[in-house]
Structures are given as structure tokens and as C-alpha cells.
Amino acid sequence: MPVSSARRAPLTRARVLAAATAVADEVGIERLTMRLVADRLDVEAMALYRHVASKDALLEGLVESVVDEVSAACATLDEPQPGPGEDWRAVARRRILTAREVVLRHPWFPSLISARGTMGGSLLRYFDAFSGILLAGGLSPELLHRALHTLGSRVLGFTQELFAPDAPALADPDEATAALEAVAADLPSIARMMAVAVHDADTTIGWCDDQAEFEFGLDVTLDGLEARRREEAGRG
């Protein structure tokens, strides 16, 4: 039953973005339209344009909205920056895995942020806060620069896949075995790897980015950065 204009909450940019987020969570970012968002809010589509100037502005707002959600989730950790001599890796790791919990609720976010290619205010503030943890932990500005390049999208809780094949995973064991045998002769190393590879669809953002693989790559990177930090400190 439609909500009467007298009872309907005033339309705001925050409500528009919240509705757009809910729609994207349900149908994916590719199928998100202004009409679907308007229907969710029980308003005419033209009413949205008083709060987001275009579809492009809506998408930009969705990036900022999810980053704000990540920042808010990290703020609930309520932990100080590491002091001198304290292990910064544990603090950074908790922040990154907390970000991942948010992004797993919005699986469309990685592709959207990759497509945007720009860093808005919320994203810059998030990376600045994360950078402060690394600097407080003893990383030099030069090593921080390399750390951000190396960590990349992991800071936001996901990894940018090399490629994502369009073909669906083979659920039937016999089909999977046959597919593996078909490539074994030409691609023996990949076939050997795939024979033991395990992917948990419930934790995947992308193709191979499941939780165990994400945490493995994260830990290797953090440990490597700490080794470089100690090396620099030893030279000083």
C-alpha cells in the first residue's frame, strides 16, 4: 500500500543512497536504475534528481557511502594507534578484516570502485587514517608509500583479481574432473594447482578471493613490510 505524502519521511540524499545501496545489494550494480531506487522510496524518479544530479553522481555517492560504512565499522574497534615498539600489524590487520566484513555485504563494491578510478573525500580520509597506523608503527614515509602500493585494494577489504572468468563454476564432480583432465596436458602446472585449490563461494568477492586466500596474502604482505621496517631501523 503506498505511503501517503503526509506520512512519508522527507526525501534526502542519505535516504536516496540508502535505498540505492539496498537495491544494489539485491540486484547488483549492473541492474541498478534510478527507477528501481525511486520505486524503493515510493517516489517519482524525477524526485531523486534534487538529491543526486545524475546516475553517475548516484554511483559516486554509493562509493562514498560504503567507505563511510567501513570507516564507521573500524571506529567501533576503539583501539589506539600502535605506540613505539608495539606491533602495528595486528592493528592494521583488524582494520582490514573489519573493512572486508562490510564489503562482503556489498559484493558489487569492488567492481564499482575499480570502475570509478577516482578517490573522493571519504576514501582519502580512510586511507589517511590507515596510513597513520603504519607511520605510528614505525614505517618511514618512503616505506608507507610502497606499503600502500603493495596492499592496494586489500586496505578496503578485497583484492583486485587478475581476471574473472565468465563461465560458472562446475558443481558436478565428474564435470570438474573432466575439465581438469582436459587442460592437464597443455597446462600441467596450473592443473596441478587446481587439483588442490578450494574456493568457498560464501566468502568470495570476485573469483579466487576467498577468505583464506585473502588472509594469507594479507599476512605475507604485512610480515614482509615489518621485515623491511626492521631492516631500515637497523641501518639507522
Image (cartoon, helix red, strand yellow):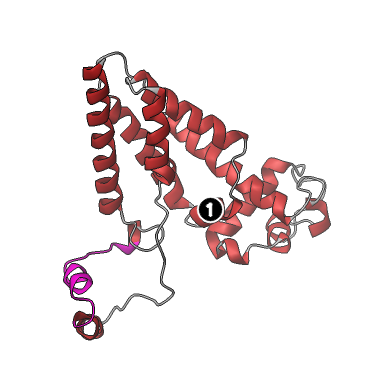
Q: Amino acid at mark 1?
A: Ser
230 vs 38, nearest the viewer:
230
Q: Position of residue 20 (x, y in %)?
A: 64, 53
Residue drawn at (19%, 70%), measured in percent from left and top? 189
- Asked whether residue 81 is in view, the answer is no
191, above or below 131, in the image = below
Q: Is residue 134 magenta?
A: no
In the rendered picture of this protein, how many numbered marks are placed on residues? 1
For residue 76, what is the image quadrant? top left
Residue that lies at the very extreme toward the front in this rendered image: 235
Residue drawn at (52%, 39%), measured in percent from left and top? 69
Q: Which residue is mark 1?
A: 114
197, above or below 85, in the image = below
For residue 138, what is the image quadrant? top left
What is the magenta range?
185-201
Q: Position of residue 133 (x, y in %)?
A: 39, 24
198 vs 219, nearest the viewer:
219
Quadrant location of the N terminus in the rendered image: bottom right
Mark 1 secondary-structure assignment: helix
Residue 125 lies left or right of residue 144; in this view the side is right
Residue 135 lies left or right of residue 192; in this view the side is right
Residue drawn at (41%, 65%), measured in percent from left and top? 163
115 vs 53, nearest the viewer:
115
Residue drawn at (37%, 38%), measured in percent from left and top? 96
